[in-house]
Image: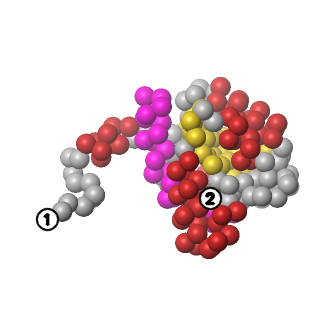
Amino acid sequence: MAHGHAHKHGDPVDEHRAAGKRAVRCLVVTVSDTRTLDDDKSGATAKECLGAAGHEVVRREIVKDERKAILALLRSAIDDEGTDAVVLTGGTGVAPRDVTFEAVQGILEKPLDGFGELFRSLSYDEIGAAAMLSRAVGGITARTAIFALPGSTKAVRLGIEKLVGPELGHILGLIAP
């Protein structure tokens, strides 16, 4: 009888994952020209979902849709030993002001192409072909994980609950043991 790919108790992959699991200190960044912390539903959703996944949001920021501003914030987070991961929301579309993808992609040392691919695949199940307009992107620079999600609360919830939240502890266990 052929064996499936289900992991059994005591499986080395599960043990490796469990050993690497930990609460990750996150910076949540909302990319927007108009939002404030008071009306930033996507940032609030990101904080809630990361907390539910066992992670800690140490800071929330709003940054304008400007590549230089996004890059400056990312560099400060990478240099900050109290920040393990950055989760951005907004600016991942195709409109002229959407520059989050370019800023994040330009700073990544190790892109995780699978993040964007899986996010768009999951989005396709919810919104159909419009999912291809999402330029969600993620990866690693130094000892910091960076993930950029679209600005809708649905997209933030989907990306964190299904992808970022469950794997963040594992990723940090690998890049900053």
Q: Is residue 164 above or below residue 141?
A: below
According to the picture, the residue beneath numbered tag 1 turns out to be: 1
Query: Quick check: 130 left or right of 38?
Result: left
Q: Is residue 170 magenta?
A: yes
Q: Are marks 2 and 1 in contact (CB under 8 Å)?
A: no
Residue at the farthest left position: 1
Query: Which of the 4 image quadrants contains residue 27?
Result: top right
The quarter of the image holding the C terminus is top left
Q: Nearer the viewer, residue 21 or 111?
A: 111
Q: Earlier in the sequence, mark 2 or mark 1?
A: 1
Q: Secondary structure of the magenta portion, mostly? A: helix
Q: Position of residue 86 (x, y in %)?
A: 62, 41
Which disc number belongs to residue 68? none
> Which residue is found at the position 13% from the left and 65% from the top?
1
What is the span of residues highlighted in magenta in the rendered image? 152-177
Query: Quick check: 156 left or right of 166?
Result: right
Callout 1 amino acid: Met
Label 2: which secondary element: helix
Label 1: which secondary element: loop
Query: Which of the 4 image quadrants contains residue 111?
Result: top right
According to the picture, the residue beneath numbered tag 2 turns out to be: 156
- Residue 49 visible somewhere in the drawing: no
Q: How is the image coloured?
A: secondary structure
Callout 2 amino acid: Val
Q: Position of residue 77 (x, y in %)?
A: 66, 32
Q: Is residue 149 magenta?
A: no
